Amino acid sequence: MLRLEDIRKSYNVGLPSQTEVLHGIDVTLQRGEFVALIGPSGSGKSTLLNIIGLLDRATSGRLFINGKETSSLPEHEITRLRGHSIGFVFQYHLLISAFTALENVMMPMWSDRRFASADMETRARELLGEVGLAAVAGNKANNMSGGQQQRVAVARALAMKPDLVLADEPTGNLDTASADDVFALLRRENTRHGTTFLLVTHNLDLARRCDRIIKVVDGRISP
Amino acid sequence: MNPLLPFEWVVAIRFLREGRMQTLFILVGIAIGVGVIVFMTAMLAGLEQNFLKRVLTSQPHVQLLPPDQIARPLRDIPGVIEDPVVQRPSQRIISIDQWRKIVAAARAMPDVAEVSPTTAGSVLASRGDASRSVTMSGVEPETYFNIVRVPDYIVAGQPRLTSEDVIIGTELAKDLGASVGDKLNLRAASGATRVLTISGLVDLGNKSANQRTTFVALRTAQSLLGIIGGATTIDITVRDIYAAETVAQEIEAAQRVEADSWIKTNAQFFTAVQAQKNTNLLIRVFVALSVAFGIAAVLVVSVIQRSKDIGILRAMGTRRGQVLAIFLVQGGVLGFLGSLAGSGLGAAALVYWHAMARQADGSELFPLILEQSLFIETALLATLTGLVAATIPAVRAADLDPVVAIRG
């Protein structure tokens, strides 16, 4: 489903201060896998996640999503691929506060099709039901707890039925009970829909409950 | 959620709604700016129209006169030495040559609204022991009254001009102790006299004009001044007052007459009108600029405040162009809503000012002109200003790197 070949990332390219933070990463994720990405702070996890999520481009190397090589795709194709194939769950700033939970879940479909429709709303309600938040569909972000916001973010990440969901410390900001809830939810969605998940986490306990652990140390995959 | 509004519009409006205080303050700012533009423009248009009406309904737009009489010394005659100084001859009151033909030609011009022949000259008006030197204008009331609105200025009597009638200025009536129905003796320099009945008194809004003005029928003036069947001037009104000089030049080129337009004879007034228009334009430009900078400042701050939202939108597949549109729409909506509020504010201020500001005689200082086009133009201008002002913040938002934006 996802293949990275010799991915390298440098900052300040061409300047004396050029720094390479990823030194030739080779990773493959199979469809339906639930993988943890761990490593110490500053090891390059987030950079790698941004490259996989097509938010950032590698300096060199090749990235395949569903067999399609992405490094040479133009900006608009990248945006389209990101919107259709990849879902994101972030640690902070989970929802757009000007919109309700329901609208936040609808947003990826809404942005893609430009006009709101009944089937979009049905899909969003269905997802909110799946994450157990049908009752707070009309609430705005500031009227929900952190755990609830993170569940809405998970529902939103699944809205476009993506092949891959990238979650950057999805439980890092939650108490233990909420963190367990959110993790269980991700796992359930993975099992139910066969969506591939890649989780960045510092929580080794959570990482051990994943199918596989990829460890990044100093910009390299550690065995 | 409105299914008729595109995504970018919905996001733009929600962002504006969420930043309530910020939106409210900038809307008030825009409204004040637009209000000033509406107020200034409408008031100046009213004042201008008032001035123009006063000036141009009491005088013709174009006046045709006989060409200057010049001395023509005999040249090249053997034995005759030409004097280096040729004295300018005195200008007799003479009729315009072939004036009926010129009147007909002027009437045929598309820009010309009305043409009227006039015979004018100085006479002595006397009543009892009192006498005053006055300007007598012999006119055809049916056409002349369309050029100089004498009936509008009548304060006593009737705007009637049979061969036995005379209409005089109010100050002249005072000086001669005369009123409507009294007899008035008019004597020309040649000694010819006529006794006429005062049919009306006019107030032309100018004391010296009221002291000197008398209107009689064309034939009466012709016979008194000894210009039988002649016309000393031809008065013309044109459809577009600012085309008067062009019309004057066209007639002068085609006929043997001198043509003076109101623009030439009222050069100072015309310059004042132009200066007023230029000042208004400058005020509009500077107010529009300050509104634009206000909108831009608010949106620049909004882009910074919304950077994480923008990052999330971009991460979920929102295109760069859509982000650009979200901020452009915000600018346009701010401009449009501000213009609506500002139009109301300007109109209210105008109505209040119109009610309060009066001339010394209690009449209105300017006519209240609230044209729909002014509001439409202002709304368009403000919306466009909003769009232009939003361009730089919108481009900044669209160019935000999603990784940096999400990280905040």
Image (spheres, coloured by chain):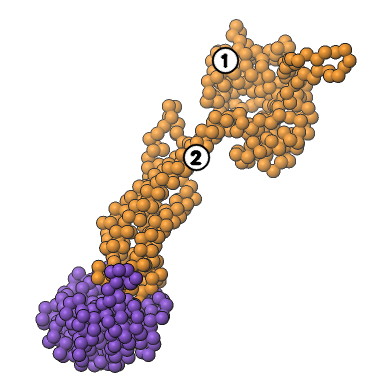
Q: Nearer the viewer, residue B407 or B61?
A: B407
Q: Which residue is mark 1?
A: B178
Query: Seen in the image, is A138 located left or right of residue B334?
Result: left
Query: Seen in the image, is B396 located left or right of residue B222?
Result: left
Q: Nearer the viewer, residue A164 or A220?
A: A220
Q: Nearer the viewer, residue B243 or B274?
A: B274
Colour in which chain A is drawn: purple
Q: Nearer the viewer, residue B242 or B401?
A: B401
Who's the residue at 73% across and 41% down the image?
Answer: B108
Question: Would residue A76 be seen by someone viewing this image from the given angle?
Answer: yes
Q: The disc labelled 2 sits on which kind of residue?
A: Lys
Q: Is residue B165 above or below residue B25?
A: above
Q: The disc labelled 1 sits on which kind of residue?
A: Ala
Who's the residue at 29% across and 55% down the image?
Answer: B24
Q: Residue B5's spot in the image, x, y percent?
A: 39, 70
- Residue most extreme to the front: A16
Q: Which residue is mark 2?
A: B277
